[in-house]
């Protein structure tokens, strides 16, 4: 994690505050920024769930949701090599998240399965929060940050 990432890209990055340390319990107040109250509440919910996961103190979860209870508040795009269910990492009920797993090589192609799936999720459930998960040493994330900061021409 670069300590001056926001300075480099020239803007506040609310999601960056969500993961500013090595993997340990994150302070929920660090997730209090965002563009709207709904986004802030979603980040807060993910942060609290992650704290419970790290502390090995998950909430009791139902086995599977019924159709009426599926109302995802966030879309989470994670890398294909993640070996743990993302819902478990954030200690949420099944149906609270739309989870997409991708390999870096297909992630940016228009008309790809990923884009079509994300468009469907947005159209069907209208979640207000999109979270992209990657490891701290991700070359793909570093390249995206270089492009956003203007260091590299896309």
Image: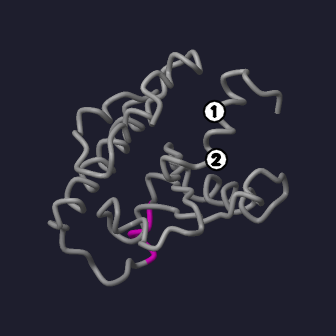
* Residue 89, x across and y down, in percent: 34, 63
Q: Which residues are magenta?
A: 67-71
Question: What residue is at 25 percent from the left and 75 percent from the top?
Answer: 61
Q: Residue at x 77, y 60 (%)?
A: 106
Relative horizontal placement of residue 11, taking residue 109 as reference (left or right): left
User: Front-most of 129 and 77?
Assistant: 77
Measuring from the top left, give residue 135's x and y in whole percent: 49, 52
Asked if disc 1 and disc 2 are in contact, CB closer than 8 Å, the reply is no
Residue lying at the far bottom of the rendered structure: 63
List the residue tagged with mark 2: 139
Does 8 appear in magenta? no
Q: Is the stretch drawn in magenta largely helix, strand or loop? A: helix
Q: Which residue in the structure is indicated by mark 1?
A: 145
The label on residue 2 is none
**As rendered, which of 136 and 71 lies closer to the eye?**
136
Q: Residue at x 56, y 56 (%)?
A: 77
Mark pair 1, 2: CA separation: 10 Å
At x 45%, y 76%, the residue is: 67
């Amino acid at each position: 994690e670069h300590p001056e990432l926001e300075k480099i890209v020239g803007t506040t990055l609310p999601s960056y505050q969500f993961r500013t340390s090595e993997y340990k319990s994150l302070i929920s107040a660090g997730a209090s920024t965002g563009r709207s109250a709904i986004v802030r509440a979603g980040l807060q919910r993910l942060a609290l769930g992650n704290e419970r996961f790290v502390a090995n103190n998950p909430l009791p979860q139902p086995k599977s949701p019924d159709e009426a209870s599926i109302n995802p508040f966030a879309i989470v795009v994670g890398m294909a090599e993640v070996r743990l269910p993302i819902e478990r990492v954030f200690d949420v009920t099944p149906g609270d998240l739309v989870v997409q797993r991708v390999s870096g090589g297909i992630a940016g192609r228009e008309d790809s399965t990923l884009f079509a799936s994300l468009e469907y999720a947005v159209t069907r459930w209208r979640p207000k929060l999109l979270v992209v998960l990657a490891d701290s040493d991700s070359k793909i994330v570093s390249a995206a940050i270089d492009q956003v900061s203007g260091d590299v021409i896309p």
